Image (cartoon, rainbow, N blue to C red):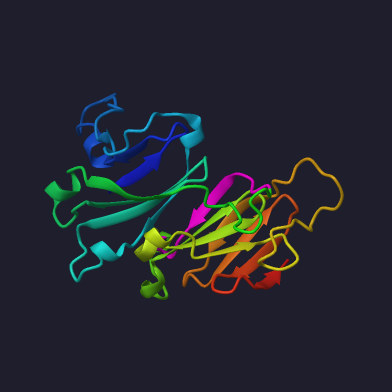
Amino acid sequence: MRIITGDECGVLKESIPELSRPKENVKEAKLPIDLGVSRIAGDVETMCRSRGIVDLSFCRSSELDTDDVSGNLSFCALRANGTLERWDGVAPFTSKPDRLCGGSYKKTHSIDNIFQMKDKKEAHVGRPIAMSSILRYQHCADIARSNIVACCSSVGVVSIFDTHQMEKGIRAQYSAYGKSGKDPVLTYTKGKFTNRDMATVMAMDFDAKRVVIGGRERAATMLDVETGEKIWKV
């Protein structure tokens, strides 16, 4: 087993639980918390809470999409400052020695201010809350769409990315709480209100065609990933 985690100061780590298991038949064995845990190299920026990890999700990158992908591993990291990163690497798992060996990763893409609306640069975009891709599921309905990643902010701004073409930036951008899926103006709460951060969670379906956003207004809104159309609300 290989676990990728991130903390509130922005540090990415890889954990291999097998290396931290105590010896068998040893009573009161203590687990060494540092054994089997290593920091993912390549991120040399200063640790700070503004770069804290909000969410992580596995993805596919065009450079690593080959017939033999047994050792390739790519993931995206969403940071508290609104930056989306893609990390590519190799983490073999075909044999037990491979599974006990740490992977090698490199940050290949980084996109800043992913929730800033193109036509509404002064609009309040909230803070990052979630990221989703279909690789969170054990079985995907359409593996060809495993390159789609959706990120959501606390005001319901949803930014869509194609991990095969990260250099092109945001593929599409919608709003869960506007009059239409593409209107960034909040309409759920009238008047001058202080707390506009209503969204708290987002999920993607298993074929990357729809996302659902829910939050403090106790409603769930479903958006079409390709058009931004509001399909359903409850």
Where is 10 relative to 90, above or below?
A: above
Q: Nearer the viewer, residue 27 or 206?
A: 206
Q: How many marks?
A: 0
Residue at 79%, 57% in the rendered image? 188
Q: Quadrant of residue 66?
A: bottom left
20 to the left or right of 207: left
Q: Quadrant of the C terminus?
A: bottom right
x, y percent for residue 74: 31, 55
- Does 128 lie within the magenta span? yes
Residue at 49%, 60% in the rendered image? 170
169 to the left or right of 70: right
Q: Nearer the viewer, residue 121 or 140?
A: 121
205 to the left or right of 174: left
Residue at 25%, 67% in the rendered image? 65
For this orientation, the residue located farthest to the right is: 191
- Does 44 lie within the magenta span? no
Where is 67 relative to 192, above or below?
A: below
Q: Which residues are magenta?
A: 124-135
Where is 9 relative to 118, above or below?
A: above
202 to the left or right of 134: right
Q: Nearer the viewer, residue 56 or 139?
A: 56
x, y percent for residue 32: 27, 26
x, y percent for residue 102: 20, 42
Q: Quadrant of residue 23?
A: top left
Q: Quadrant of residue 67?
A: bottom left
